[in-house]
Each structure stands twice: as structure tokens, then as C-alpha cells.
Amino acid sequence: MPETVTITDNRTGESVEVPISNGGVDASQWSKLLPGIWFYDPSFGATAAASSSITELDGENGILRYRGYPIEQLAEQSTYLEVAYLLIHGELPNAEQFAAWTHDITYHTFIHENVRKRFMEGFHHDAHPMGILVSTLAALSTFYPDAKDIFGAESRHKQIIRLIAKMPTIAAGAHRHSVGMPFVYPDNNLDFCSNFLSMMWKVAEPHFQPDPVLSHALDVLFILHADHEQNCSTTAMRVVGSSHADAYSASAAAAAALYGPRHGGANEAVIRMLTEIGTIDNVEPFIASVKEGKGRLQGFGHRVYKNYDPRARIIKKVAYDVFEVTGKNQLLDIALKLEETALSDDYFISRKLYPNVDFYSGLIYQAMGFPMEMFTVLFAIPRVAGWLAHWNEMLDQDARIARPRQLYTGEAVRDYVPMGGR
Ligand code: ACO
């Protein structure tokens, strides 16, 4: 059987046979046969916007791999910094490469004093930390004019290191500002996640050493969130990057995309939903109301996964490790009952709605003491590695500027009517 698709224009009888390659067909063949007829796909539901060798996602079978390595193995055996290296460089580092990578990231964790004092402290006291993060990322481009050199290998590498390194510093700074606590400088003696926790929670102690179970749990969560192929924020990164904007401006756009409740804001929505449900007895009426179309079951469903999100399975395990240290999150029982009820209900089964990564991550973050406003920020910290891997790849591919077409449905030409005549 030929691995091809034939497109026929029934108006003319002309057709073109297009080979299926890597699971897709080349749209330029469509354009050759049908100039001026656009393929209508507003939310990219059937469009591959890029070719990529970074992350493989098989939603039907619940498979997620970074550069070929199964997410389960990485979560079990790797660290976030090693995964970040893997995403950016395509291979796991050897000992020497990893030592250099860790050193460079550790020594770029500080942010310019003006970023902190004049810019971040200028926000209103109750500014949402995600809003602070988005704006600060954009502002960094003014501090690093060398970032404009997007085709210089050395400059590109420098911006990648800076962004991965500074995300926790900005994130913790945004939190400290929003609760009126003094900024904590990075502690370069700590590992990546412990340093972040130190910048979040340190008060008057000379040296803050977080519980290793909590640092490790955060590291696993960072691995799980590091990339997810062409999701909304990564698409924003690639689209903005395709105009040759610098890495900070493109990352700010990606972070803005992540801010929305349909994307990175969903774990916050899960906690609000569980709090609103309040008791196990309310689970069934709540599910009934969702089925009547009165709102969605937050943390369920995914554009790509039509099976259990493999990240949700790993996160559920991490949740129990964290609760050993922090005590059980009271909302856990409601979440477990909700999952059990939904997974045995035909409404959710027939629509292939399973828990996604956000269903349990919020419970862990809450148990660790993070305020809800920080949840999306916690997602953004590791996702920057994925955004940058895609940005790097897109530039190496010499991608054309992203410029979709539209189906015009507005008025036909008409004459301007002066104000008095309207
Ligand atoms: N609860 C109840 N019903 C749902 C849910 C849900 N969470 N998600 C989808 N559905 C239903 C829809 O109503 C629709 O039903 P219908 O066919 O009877 O109209 C059907 O399932 C298909 O839904 P779509 O909206 O087409 O799914 P889409 O792929 O556009 O949306 C999304 C995916 C946005 C993630 C959706 O499932 C959702 O809103 N989930 C809740 C929010 C959430 O958890 N987001 C996190 C995503 S993961 C991430 O970004 C890290």
C-alpha cells in the first residue's frame, strides 16, 4: 500500500499525490494544487507547525519522551539540570560537560540590581507573581543587548544559561515582593532546587537548607514540566522567535501564553475547584453539574493525551513522598474520589478525559507552602528549558517567519461614510 495521500480538486479533476513522511504531509503540495485555498485549522488541531527532534508525545498511548528517553526513566534517575542540558543539546552530558553546565548555571543566578530594585520593586504590592515574571523576562532584554546576536553561537548559549539560571531568582523575588518580604540572594552552595527554596523561604537564618525530600520532589516536578512539544507557550516562543526577536522577548511571550487558565493556570484552578467542592459527599453532585455543562473538571482532559497523562502518574507518587514530610493535603481525599468517580463515568470515558499533569501538582505545591499565585510560576521555571530548546532548534532550522493565512468573513468593499451620515 503506498504511503501517500491523493488530493483531488473536484472543480478541475486535477490531483496531486503527496508522500506521508514522519506522520505528516507537506502542505506546500496542497498550495501548488490549490493556490488561494487555505487549509482551515484555527487552533492547529490538525497542523504540524514544525518538525522537531526534541520531545516525542504519543497522546493515544500516553507516551512522553525527551530526546528519546522515557519521562519515567528521567524522573526516576535524572535531575532537572541534566534534563535541561539534554533538551538543549540533544544528548545527555558526560561528567565534564555536566560539571561545566552546572557551574555556568550556578554562576548566572544573580540578577542585575536594577532589575530587582528599580523594576521588580516598582510593582504594586499585590501584583500577581506571574505578571511580574512575564514583565521581568521582557525587561531582561534591555539589560543584555548582546542577546540581539541570535545567530552567534556564543551569544545564544549565554542567553540560554542566563535564562535557565535566573528564572528561580526572578520567581522567588516575585513571591517575596508580593508578600512584603526582603529579597534573598542566590546561595551558590546549594543545588538548583534547594537554592530556589532558600530564596523562597529563608528568613533570618544564616544558611537555609531545605528538606532533601522536598528539593527532590520539586526537581522531579521540574523534569516533568521541562518540555511538552508544540503546546501553546512553546508555539508562542517559536512564533515570536521566528521574527528574530531576542530570547528574553520570546520567553516573555511564551510565559504570557502559559499564564492563561487553559494552560499553566490550570493547577491553580484545580485547587479552587477542590476547595469549592469541600467534602467527599459533594463530589458526585459536582460531577453531575460538570456533565450538565456547568463548568469543567479542572485538571482533566488534554488536547493531545487521550489516555492517562504519564506525568500525572509520576506526580501522584511524588505527592505521597511530599505528604510524608508536610502532612497530607486535606484536599487529597476529594481529589482521589473525584478521579475515581470520573474515571468510571461514561461521560469522561467516552470523551477520553483523564487526569492531566495539573490534577495533582497543585496539591503538592500547596502542601509545600507555595501560595496559589505561584503555581504557574513554578511551571514556568523549568519550562524555559523547553522553550529555549525549541527556539534554538527553530533558529538552526532557519525557519521562515510564522505567518498564517485567514479565511476572510467580513464585509465586502464599501465606501466610507462621514460621521454625520451614520
Ligand atoms: N471537564 C469536562 N468536560 C470536558 C473537559 C473537562 N475538563 N475537557 C473537555 N471536556 C469535554 C468538552 O466539553 C467536549 O465535550 P463535547 O464533545 O460534548 O462538546 C469534549 O470534552 C472535547 O473537549 P474540547 O474542548 O474539544 O477539548 P480541547 O482539546 O479543546 O481542550 C483542554 C483541552 C483545554 C485541556 C480541556 O480539556 C480543558 O479545558 N481542561 C480543563 C483545564 C485543564 O486541566 N487544563 C490543563 C491542560 S494541561 C496543561 O496545559 C499543562
Image: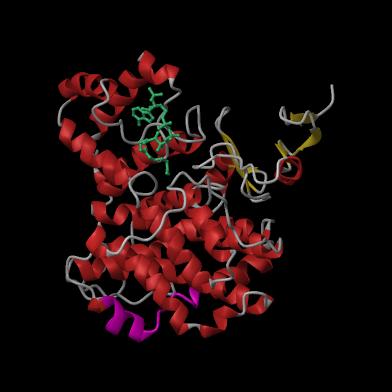
Could you tell me what secondary structure mostly forms the magenta stretch?
Answer: helix
Q: Position of residue 80 (x, y in %)?
A: 51, 56
Whether 270 is drawn above or below 417: the answer is above
Rendering coords of residue 418 (x, y %): 29, 64
**Left or right of residue 90, residue 271 in this image:** left
Residue 256, x across and y down, in percent: 39, 59
Q: Is residue 206 above or below residue 412?
A: below
Indicate whether residue 107 is drawn in magenta.
yes
Q: Is residue 309 above or below residue 416?
A: above
Numbered label tally: 0
- Indicate the colouring scheme: secondary structure
- Range of magenta residues: 105-120
Q: Nearer the viewer, residue 208 or 360?
A: 360
The front one of 44 and 224 is 44
Q: Residue furthest right?
A: 2
Would you say residue 127 sits in the magenta stretch?
no
Of residue 132 and residue 232, the one placed in the foreground of this image is 232
Q: Residue at x 50, y 27 (%)?
A: 307
Residue 417 pos. (x, y %): 32, 60
Lateral position of residue 236 relative to residue 171, left or right: right
- In the picture, residue 4 is in which quadrant? top right
Tell me, yes or no, if residue 191 can be seen here.
Answer: no
Q: Residue at x 35, y 58 (%)?
A: 377
Whether residue 242 is visible to the viewer of this picture, yes or no, is yes
Direction from residue 132 to residue 65 in the image, left or right: right
Q: Which corner quadrant holds the N terminus?
A: top right
Q: Which quadrant holds residue 8? A: top right
Q: Residue furthest front?
A: 421
Of the 4 image quadrants, the one containing the C terminus is bottom left
- Residue 50 as seen in the image, left or right of residue 261: right
Q: Quadrant of ligand 1?
A: top left
Q: Residue at x 31, y 19 (%)?
A: 341
